[in-house]
Amino acid sequence: MSEPTIEFYGAQWCGDCRRAQALMEHFGVDFNYHDIDASEADKARAIEISGLQKIPVLLFPDGSHLSEPSSPLLQEKLTELNLI
């Protein structure tokens, strides 16, 4: 059985998205990437999750989410969920 995956909503032009993606790849954390520029549905879902028009939006397996997290905050959350 595979571990639940993080849903990652972002865009290629977004520096915070690239930073968050690099951090998760560095630690080998699995995630599903949703490009909000390629899908209006993904864009709407990101706003629905966070209530904000900020990216990245990260939806975690426990149902919590972070919007535009700093690297230390994201690393803390991944540690809390035993993903790293």
Image: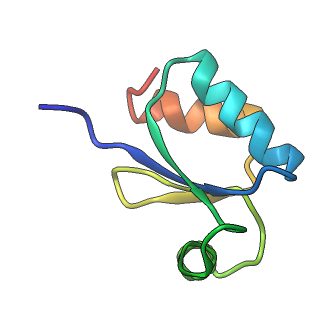
Residue 41's quadrant in the figure? bottom right
Report if residue 70 is visible in the image.
no
Left or right: 15 with respect to 43? right
- The residue shown at (41%, 27%) is 83
In the rendered image of this protein, does residue 77 appear above or below residue 12?
Answer: above
In the rendered image of this protein, does residue 59 appear above or below residue 42?
Answer: above
In the rendered image of this protein, does residue 28 appear above or below residue 45?
Answer: above
Left or right: 53 with respect to 61? right
- The residue shown at (63%, 75%) is 43
- The residue shown at (38%, 27%) is 82
Left or right: 82 with respect to 55? left
What x and y, as percent, mark residue 49?
53, 74
Q: Residue furthest front?
A: 38
Residue 9's quadrant in the figure? bottom right
Q: Residue furthest left?
A: 1
What x and y, as percent, mark residue 63?
37, 61
- The residue shown at (55%, 82%) is 48
| Total numbered labels placed on residues in the image | 0
What x and y, as percent, mark residue 12?
79, 50
